[in-house]
Image: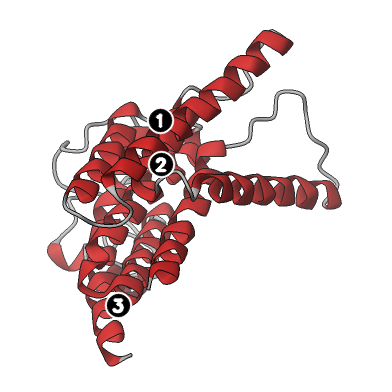
Amino acid sequence: MATSLIWALIYGGGGAIAGSFLAALVLRWLDGRSVMAGRSACDACGATLRAWELVPLVSALALRGRCARCGHAIDPVHGRIEALAALIGAGAGWVAGPAGWTGALFGWLLLALAALDLLALWLPDRLTILLAVAGLVTGALGFAPSLADRIVGGLVGFGGLWAIATAYRLARGREGMGGGDPKLMGAIGLWLGWRMLPAVLLVACLIGLGFVGWRALAGRRAAADDRVPLGFLLALAAYPAWALMLWWAA
């Protein structure tokens, strides 16, 4: 128990730092800027942020979510992604101990993809490819599941959603799924193997149905052009599936 807590704290701290980078990546990509576009600066006044203003979570709390120079509110996406990345890292350290870096990496990449899909319905190929390659590498290094299971999972994950999307397009004459969703499902399969994919898809669909039901109860009717961020839902279901997979194997 004590060892698990130590690793949770280590990876949780690392997650807060990773979350700072992920938040910058997400917001810069959404603004059409390069991730390497200079030092972090206030979105309102353009002042370059000093080191003490860049401490993950701590700086935002100390400054009450505002720029120290102009007082403009900082985009809350920064703090939310940092906090979630810290929780992901802590969870990975608690479940997997020193090998938790694999799950933390999986969760952090999923977090970035989920944020982009939720905010802009966009799953960039370069990030999905990075997730897929990392899944293959960790499998080749001997981390469960086996590399063979991962490869089958990648093929089944991508092929299954691609077939569903193609069948819908042929039957309805319009797109029913974004092109990035099958790619993300394939990348998830390269991490979890084929056995966990039905559960991931089921949980993602249940979360989506729950969200639609909540909107209906709130009096918000679904429009014909409403789009559900399936990639966000898949990411939301995939990381707990990784933790559950390790718990079963333990």
Q: CA distance from mark 2 to mark 3?
A: 25 Å
Residue 175, image x, y percentages: 62, 16
Q: Quadrant of the N terminus?
A: bottom left
Q: Nearer the viewer, residue 63 or 123?
A: 123
Label 3 Cα neighbours within 10 Å, binned few <14 / some 14-19 / many ≥20: many
Task: Give the residue number, with chain letter if any, for mark 2.
Answer: 189
Residue appearing at x 40%, y 46% in the figure: 193
Q: Nearer the viewer, residue 100 or 143?
A: 143
Task: Give the residue number, with chain letter if any, for mark 3.
Answer: 8
Between marks 2 and 3 in the image, the one whose residue lies nearer the viewer: 2
Label 1 Cα neighbours within 10 Å, binned few <14 / some 14-19 / many ≥20: some
The disc, 1 or 2, on the residue closer to the chain's N-terminal end is 1
Q: In the picture, residue 49 is in which quadrant?
A: bottom left
Residue 153, image x, y percentages: 41, 39
Check disc 2 and give the amino acid type. Gly
The disc, 2 or 3, on the residue closer to the chain's N-terminal end is 3
Task: Give the residue number, with chain letter if any, for mark 1.
Answer: 155
Between marks 3 and 1 in the image, the one whose residue lies nearer the viewer: 1
| Helix, strand or loop status at disc 1 | helix
| Helix, strand or loop status at disc 3 | helix
Q: Nearer the viewer, residue 84 or 240?
A: 240
Residue 150, image x, y percentages: 34, 43
Check disc 3 and give the amino acid type. Ala
Q: CA distance from mark 3 to mark 1?
A: 33 Å
Q: Report the side of 166 relative to 47 (left or right).
A: right
Check disc 1 and give the amino acid type. Leu
Q: In the picture, residue 55 is in which quadrant?
A: bottom left
The answer to the question of whether label 3 and label 1 lie on touching residues, with beta carbons closer than 8 A, is no
| Helix, strand or loop status at disc 2 | helix
Residue 7 appears anywhere in the view? yes
Seen as rendered, the residue at the extreme bottom is 2
Residue 4, image x, y percentages: 30, 83
